[in-house]
Image: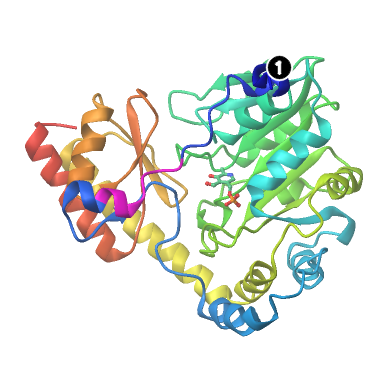
Amino acid sequence: MDWDAQIRSELEPMVPYAPGLRASEVRERSGKDTILKLSSNEHPCGPFPSAIRAVTAVLGRLNRYPDGSATALAGKLCETLNVADENLVVSNGSNELIRLIAQAVLRPADEVVFAWPSFVVYPMVTQMFGATSVKVPLTDDGVHDLDAMLAACNERTRLLFLCSPNNPTGTIYGRDAFEKFLDKVPEHVLVVVDEAYFEFVMDADFPDALDAFDGVRPLVVLRTFSKIYSLAGLRIGYGAMPAPLARAVAKIREPFNVNTPAQIAAYYSLLDEPEIRRRRLENQEQKTYLYSCFDRLGVAYYRSHTNFVYFMTKRPVEVFEALLEEGVIVRDFGTAPALRVGIGTPEDTAITIAAFESVTARLGSI
Ligand SMILES: Cc1ncc(COP(=O)(O)O)c(C=O)c1O
């Protein structure tokens, strides 16, 4: 077999998604007992207690295929979000929807506009389906440059991703800027707003893209149960989208793409509003402690609306390695002069702060 001829040439320049280091690998390298994995924006607490009980109760029924339409969960989401059935799609993580939407709409020669740096999966799905990425740099404040993104649209633009708040910078654009953007974006451009960190946001000026969703406008809003709900390991997310796109996605998704424990855990998690509020507040408090540590140590960072903080460093490789030696795994971006650290429990924050103090003492500065 000539594999180069066999495999689609679009895949040739791609590299597989690189997850952060595993805690077990770092434990061996650092010799530390306590390893903090703060590289994947996961929530430090486990799933909600009601979700754990529901999943445990369903284990004996795993001989059955899941409900292929995730009926109960989809119904609950429609009610909670005030979205019609025909517009709501549940998926195997929101990542799956990013890919399915790209697969449903992209053709070679199409262009896909998104901010940069942003979520690495946008360029991956663009390349996968033979389209071209148009990366629009963030402003100096690390925010989406919505005007520049509009200017980057042309007749070939098929898709435009907005990551709100943005991963990895944790930043948001305001409501006014978003409304003006929506007024101006060309009608042939499908706008996908990825709100994976929506539940952490506490800023009154944050535009909830669902407010602009009417099922007609070419707008998709994506959310996930992987973050504040702590269900990353089960893989479940959802999206609101115009009905023709939802029908197209239904044609190309796997028949039973969302497993039963995921559907049940997500359903019960939605019922526990107080726990969501508690987690949001705790995250905010811990972020504030980390900011005060960064301020004290002279580390520059973007104020984040998520459960992670993007901080600047002139020597990312050295700082990444030094933090690993302290047992703290952060996310690096190759040679970009910045790293991203996740927010954990109060105990995690204390360890993180001690690690940053120790690294600064050792290296002089970060
Ligand atoms: C911006 C953004 N979108 C989507 C995802 C994917 O989430 P999921 O676990 O639902 O696939 C992530 C995960 O890190 C993310 O950061």
Colour scheme used in the picture?
rainbow
Q: Provide residue 75's location: percent of width, then percent of height.
A: 81, 69
Figure check: 294 above or below 277: above
Q: Quadrant of residue 348?
A: bottom left
Residue found 74% across the figure and 65% down from its top: 77
Q: Nearer the viewer, residue 249 or 287?
A: 249
Residue found 83% across the figure and 44% down from its top: 252
Q: Provide residue 290's location: percent of width, then percent of height.
A: 27, 50
> In this picture, which residue range is highlighted in magenta?
19-26
Location of mark 1 (residue)? 5
Figure check: 313 above or below 85: above
Task: Answer with left or right where residue 73 lies relative to residue 349.
Answer: right
Q: Nearer the viewer, residue 355 or 165?
A: 355
Count of residue discs:
1
Label 1 crowd bin: few (<14), some (14–19), many (20+), radius 10 Å: few
Figure check: 148 above or below 92: above
Q: Secondary structure at mark 1?
A: helix
Residue found 54% across the figure and 43% down from its top: 165
Q: Provide residue 194's location: percent of width, then percent of height.
A: 64, 43
Q: Is residue 66 visible?
A: yes
Q: Provide residue 27's location: percent of width, then percent of height.
A: 24, 53
In the image, residue 55 lies in the stretch drawn in magenta: no
Q: Quadrant of the N terminus?
A: top right
Task: Answer with left or right where residue 3 lies relative to residue 354.
Answer: right
